Image (cartoon, rainbow, N blue to C red):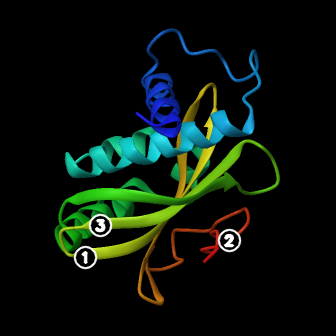
Amino acid sequence: MSNLSAVAAAAFLLVLGCGGAPRQNDVPMDAEARRALAVAATNALRETFNQDGCGSIYSEASDSFRSQQPREPWMNECQRLRGKLGEWECFGVKLAAGCGSSDEFMCVSGSATFESGVYHVVVAYRLETGRARLESFFLKNGEKWTFPPSQQYYRPHYDPPLRDPS
């Protein structure tokens, strides 16, 4: 198991709350721990998406995510994506880094393989009390961002998605 896999596995346990995860205010997280937490959260997001967990994704998202878009439009779009894309088979991380104006935001960017094809995904998280909560989700097919489909309910309040460094 590579060092990154070991760190991601440990971070995944923190996301689940195993082992009495420290509160964020008690133990400051270094950059590598924040990255590992965000990558583990993305893997958990993939698993929840595949288990028809649109409601769980919404319920566990950050307060600002839920205040920016109502539940029903999110549920409809999530179900539409599941039908269009099929199972989210794997995710290859290209970049995991801080985004926004403080250390509380982490973005993960990479290649997501779905049954229907390969997409570029950017996920932003708000780190709260030792866990990563979904802040935004972007999906790109080729040169076109396909999710979110409109800006009607989605109004980001931090920096735009990361650009692929390649």
Which numbered mark, 2 or 1, is in the foreground of this view?
A: 1
Numbered label attached to residue 57: none
Numbered label attached to residue 160: 2
Disc 3 is placed on an element classified as strand
Please state, as top left, top right, bottom left or bottom right, where the N terminus lies in the image.
top left
Residue that badge 1 annotates:
117
* Residue 69 shows in the view: no
Q: Amino acid at mark 2?
A: Pro
Q: How far apart, in angstroms, are the residues tagged by discs 2 and 3? A: 23 Å
Q: How far from the left and from the top, in percent, is residue 48?
A: 29, 44
Q: Amino acid at mark 3?
A: Thr
Position above or below: 67 against 34: below
Name which residue lies at 52% across and 31% down: 7
Q: Choose the circle earlier in sequence order: 2 or 3.
A: 3
Answer yes or no: do the residues labelled 1 and 3 have beta carbons within 8 Å?
Answer: yes
The one nearer the camera, 124 or 2, is: 2
Disc 2 is placed on an element classified as loop
Answer with left or right where residue 103 lies relative to residue 81: right
Answer with left or right where residue 117 lies relative to residue 127: left
Residue that badge 3 annotates:
113
Answer yes or no: do the residues labelled 2 and 1 have beta carbons within 8 Å?
Answer: no
Which numbered mark, 2 or 3, is in the foreground of this view?
A: 3
Q: How far from the left and from the top, in percent, is residue 37?
A: 55, 36
Position above or below: 74 against 19: below
Q: How far from the left and from the top, in percent, is residue 13?
A: 44, 23
Position above or below: 133 against 24: below
The one nearer the camera, 143 or 30, is: 30
Q: How far from the left and from the top, in percent, is residue 87?
A: 19, 60
